[in-house]
Amino acid sequence: MTPDPTTPPDAPGRLPVVGHVMPLLRDRLAYMQQLRGHGDVVRIRVGPRPVYVVNSPELIWEMLTAQSANFSKGRLFDKLRLFGGSPLPIAEGQQHLQRRRLMQPAFHRERINSYIDTMITTAQSALRTWRPGARLDVLNEMQLMTQGIVMSVLFSSHPDRDPAQAIMKGVDTVFQAAIRRAVVPVSAPEWMPLPGNRRLRAANSLLRRTVSDIVTARRETPGTQDDIVSLLLDARDEDGRPLDDEEILSEITALLAAGSETTAVTMAWLFHELGRNPDLEQRLHREVDTVLAGGPLTAEHLPRLGHTRRLVTETLRLHNPAWIVTRQATVPVRLGTAHLPAGADLIWSPYALHRDPELYDDPQRFDPDRWLPERPQPPRGAYIPFGAGKRMCIGDGFTWAEATVLTALIASRWTLRPVPGSTVRPVPAITVHPSSLHMTAEARGHAAAREAA
Ligand code: HEM
């Protein structure tokens, strides 16, 4: 994996060639980080195709903002077409712009503030199932909470724990299959009666049923809820036509997937870090206890939870769920000294960018205090957990609110202790999730006392 010496790295249009094939799953994160040392833009191979990895924060920023018109979302997203529709994360050009305008009101700051009470009550009902001393699969618990929050806030739907678990598995199956189709050039046709295909069909029909039920219920009682389902049902295109059922289905499923897994993974990593940094955990408990002063968490408390928010900021740096984001050049482009042809596949990695020693002191260390206002901040383009430009995550404000709520709410009542002897590895799948994260839930003393009173 050293640069090809026959290719001068700085020659315009010619790039260092590194490695040949994207390595096996578990080595991929190290590989992406190692590539950063080989130049601003580096050519590698993924299967038979050349892929250009953009490393420089300035060039990533340029690609996502000033030059965004020259790129489409790329191969990975192409395979993520859901139920035949092109939801917001996949739509291109005019269709993307229209869909983004349509959905933006649901993600305005004031709207997010109005969601906080529902976020709190939804998380509280999930937390009621925790028992002192129980060993929790932390990622699974976080997924149930974040999916529950997306469903209650955006779709006004409140499934019980078992159906919620089935929906979560369904979303995962559908997306894993899409990713496999994107990276494995030849895969078995979907009609073949293989176990994987059967699981995929079952997952597809479960999701279709779930989302159709939400939409049907809403059509039967129009005007009862003011949420994203209503926005989609009321939408009309330039010719006055409503969105068809497949489009609504794919848009809701995409939101469910984009909005649940990413935040769940972030929360799992945050509690993993607290489990191995007891000083940071104590500071969190002190802050939450002081701000809440024995009362329940409300939206008004969030601005005063500075350490809590910095824990979220640092988790989104060190454990960014996105390890790879794709683009495709739609015209010949120039990025720095690199000239790339139309059709070139590009990737950048928020995960690797956020761990670059050129951009962060001691980058592998989990240190929320690096975000204190008096400390020097990283340069533009060095911290972009939600991407940038016209395709930037629409759910960034939603995530900040949700992650702060979940951290404070859990910390006000529970301590999560690592299970002795367990090792936690990052696994780069759809997101970078912990290999397995089991922790023991301990009720915090004063909370237990308050409950007993
Ligand atoms: C930790 C949490 C999250 C992270 C790290 C994250 C990350 C990202 C990133 C990096 C992108 C841009 C991809 C690109 O440039 O190609 C994106 C797009 C998107 N995200 Fe998120 N996201 C998170 C949470 C959410 C939530 C909570 C929602 C919705 C409730 C959401 C919905 C979307 C949508 C719809 C897009 C596509 C936007 C567009 O193309 O216009 N995300 N996200």
Image (spheres, grey):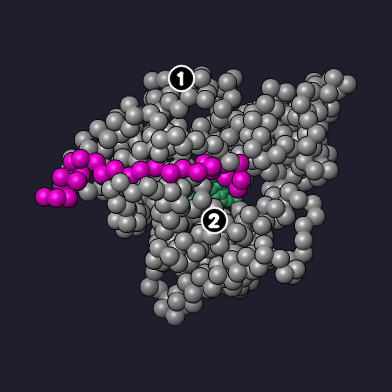
The quadrant in which the N terminus is found is top right
Residue 118 at x, y percent in the picture: 33, 57
Residue 379 at x, y percent in the picture: 54, 24
Residue that mark 1 sits on: 376
- The nearer-to-camera label among 1 and 2 is 2
Name the residue located 51 percent from the left edge and 47 percent from the top edge.
Answer: 262
Q: Residues within 10 Å of mark 1 (few under 14, many from 20)?
A: few
Quarter assignment of residue 63 = top right
Label for residue 447?
none
Near-viewer residue (150 or 222) = 150
Query: Does dot 1 land on a helix, a strand or a loop?
Result: loop
Eyeballing the image, is 219 above or below 39?
A: below
Stretch of the chain drawn in magenta: 428-453
**Which circle's residue, 1 or 2, is located before the other in the chain?**
2
Residue that mark 2 sits on: 257
Q: Does residue 302 show up?
A: no
Name the residue located 33 percent from the left edge and 26 percent from the top edge.
Answer: 279
